[in-house]
Amino acid sequence: MSSAPSPVLTATDPSTATDPSTGSADIRLIVTDMDGTLLDDAKRIPPGLWDTLAELRRRGVLFSPASGRQYATLAREFAEVAEGMAFIAENGTYVVRDGAELSSDPLEPAVAAAVVRAVRRLAASGVDVGAVVCGKRSAYVERGDEAFLTEVRRYYVEHRVVEDATAVDDDVIKIALFDFGSAERTTAPALEPFAATHQVVVSGEHWVDVMNRTANKGAALRRLQDELGITPAQTMVFGDYLNDLEMLDAADWSFAMANAHPDVVARARHLAPSNNDNGVLRTIARVLGLEA
């Protein structure tokens, strides 16, 4: 991996693209993170997305959202174009195509329960935090206050308020923690004891995810590539935050958004305009020659 990403697109001017392969790349799979990447800061779908997806389908290019969001949320967002689309949900712990599970990586029930109890202790100490127990069928939360549920609804269409989130009857694939303060400075360090055996990943300014060590977007993407017979050289990936790092490694065409975390910029091969500058679609158009 190169130490300095090359500016296939700058943050402001797509005409300055420097990669000689643009317009003729053999791309078969395009995978993009959602928040901070495909969506702008107001969580809006970029203009032109549906036309771009129609053209990609015509060319035989598979488009795959890869997100910390649950499968039900992603499926709703892309309901009109979901046929044949692969969804890498819950930060790679659950991959679904046409309603069929392609892969999953559930937590041991005892581990999930231990994380929930740790969050309860953290909240009791005064931290404004809550746990989202992410199952295959639904998400489960113990906090029922409107401020917390407003954040949960953004990412979890299917969710239930329960009395005891350690006793849900579902395959738990991830525990997501929402911290109204800084997840990186407060919640993530408090969960350090779990990092010895599991992943504790900061997936956004306010979110931390606890997953199996074997679970990440990159592992899910590699399984999808194997399933479809698609190589890293035929794969384009976009990301902006730390939960996207392994996914960038699985694609030769890896792009950090201009607004990305510095570690993501360092890991990616190329730079794309920011999420607020429609960076994903502008880059796809340039590299695949959709502007012609």
Image (tube, helix red, strand yellow):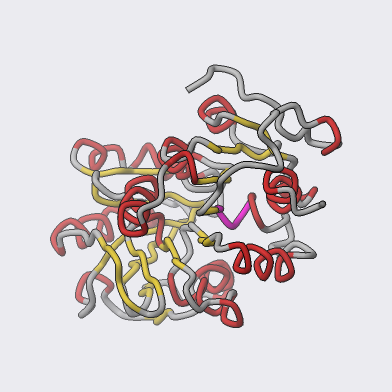
Q: Is residue 34 left or right of residue 49?
A: left
**Residue 37 among magenta residues:** no
Q: Is residue 201 left or right of residue 20?
A: left
Q: Does 175 sit above or below residue 79?
A: above
Q: How many marks?
A: 0
Taking the spot 52% from the left edge, 19% from the top edge, the residue there is: 2
Q: Does 206 sit above or below residue 42?
A: above
Classify residue 131 by image quadrant.
bottom left
Most foreground residue, 85 or 245:
85
Position in image of residue 255 (x %, y %): 60, 38
Predominant SS along the magenta part: helix
Q: Does 184 sit above or below residue 278?
A: above
Taking the spot 60% from the left edge, 68% from the top edge, the residue there is: 57
Q: Does 214 sit above or below residue 130?
A: above
- The segment highlighted magenta reads 32-36
Most foreground residue, 22 or 217:
22
Position in image of residue 284 (x %, y %): 68, 49
Position in image of residue 80 (x %, y %): 61, 82
Classify residue 88 by image quadrant.
bottom left
